[in-house]
Image (tube, rainbow, N blue to C red):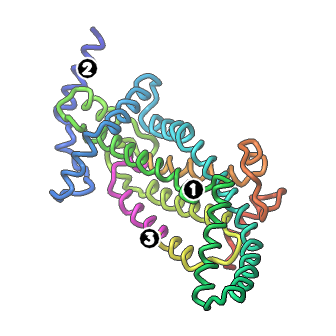
Amino acid sequence: MIRLSSSVVRANFLLRHTPATQNVRHFSKDDSFQGTWKFLSESTPVHYMQEALTAVHDISGLPWWATIAVSTFALRTVITLPLTVYEYKIISRIEKIRKEYPAIIEELKRETAIAKNQFKWTDDQAKRMFMHSAAKQWNNLVVRENCHPAKTKITILFQLPFWITTSVAIRNLVYCLPNPNLLEAKMAFMDLCTGGFLWIPNLTVPDESWILPVALGLVNFTNMKIQMTWRKTGPETKLQTGIRRVFIGLNFVMVYIATIAPSALCLYWVSSSMHGMVQNLAFVSPKVRRVLGIPELKHYPKDKPYKYLLERMLSRNK
């Protein structure tokens, strides 16, 4: 009876404080986006993610800010961490065959020069035969080590849809979607209104202090620097420079979006980025790599690897 009375009180509160009457800024009011948002909001993966987050909150009794942070770390550890370990093993195998490849190329050059004289090939014919043989030898190495470069994208292929699904699920909770008339949706909304922390008691509104958006930008930038620094074994190429600049630009865009997005969403993005940064820092450790079966980084010292990483991150040498 007490529970029923509590539900009635909460329902009455929500009837007066629905998301439709809130002064909350949405991502866009343009009609061209409504179809996309509706499709994502009502999709099956988003529905299951929304149900999972609500279940974790109800069963654990955690406030929503803790529910979002804990669920993010737990799901990323279970889903994306194994994929990342597999990806790093593939990268190590590719580095291994890259060390073998130059010797093979030198041998092919000698064989091509001999064949050119023997069969009276023109320079163009010799070049075509050399390129064909070189590509075939590289493919043989890839097959031998089972390390096709496409496999290095496996994490992002799973992580990006997972990130989008979770983001839309949290957005649904904030805006009582996909069915605003459900009592459960309104109750979740009210819990989000009071489930914040410190300077953000209400997770359905943007962080006006900009602390979370700025933290998101700093964590993403640091994460990018870690990845690009520890993988770099030589001068930065034009392609790497271009990729770095694109990611910096996207980071600024994300910071702007975070300033107008509900704090619940921004908290999820910060938690996800924090998990990625902790994960990448862990992979620098020789002990962690040994436990996970990932070959050690030959260009990193076994002692004080983090000091070496920091020095390289702060260095302007390309």
Determine the secondary structure under disc 2. Answer: helix
Label whose residue precedes the other's in the sequence (3 or 1)? 1
Secondary structure of the residue carrying numbered label 1: helix
Residue at 30 percent across and 14 percent down: it is 3
The Cα atoms of the two marked residues, 3 and 2, are separated by: 46 Å
Location of residue 296 in the rendering, given as x and y in whole percent from the top left corner: 77, 54
Quarter in which the N terminus is drawn: top left
Q: Which of 56 and 290 is in front in this view?
A: 290
Mark 1, Cα crowd under 10 Å, few <14 / some 14-19 / many 20+, is some
Residue mark closest to the camera, 3 vs 2: 3
Residues at marks 2 and 1, CA–CA distance in whole angstroms: 50 Å
Q: What element carries label 3?
A: helix
Tell me the kind of residue under disc 2: Ser
Residue on which disc 1 sits: 152
Give the residues in magenta.
247-267
- Residue 236 occupies quadrant: bottom right
Task: Identify the residue under disc 2.
Answer: 7
* Image location (x, y in percent) of residue 149: 58, 60
- The residue sitting at the front extreme is 119
Q: Mark 3 points at which residue?
A: 249
Left or right, residue 104 beside residue 147: right
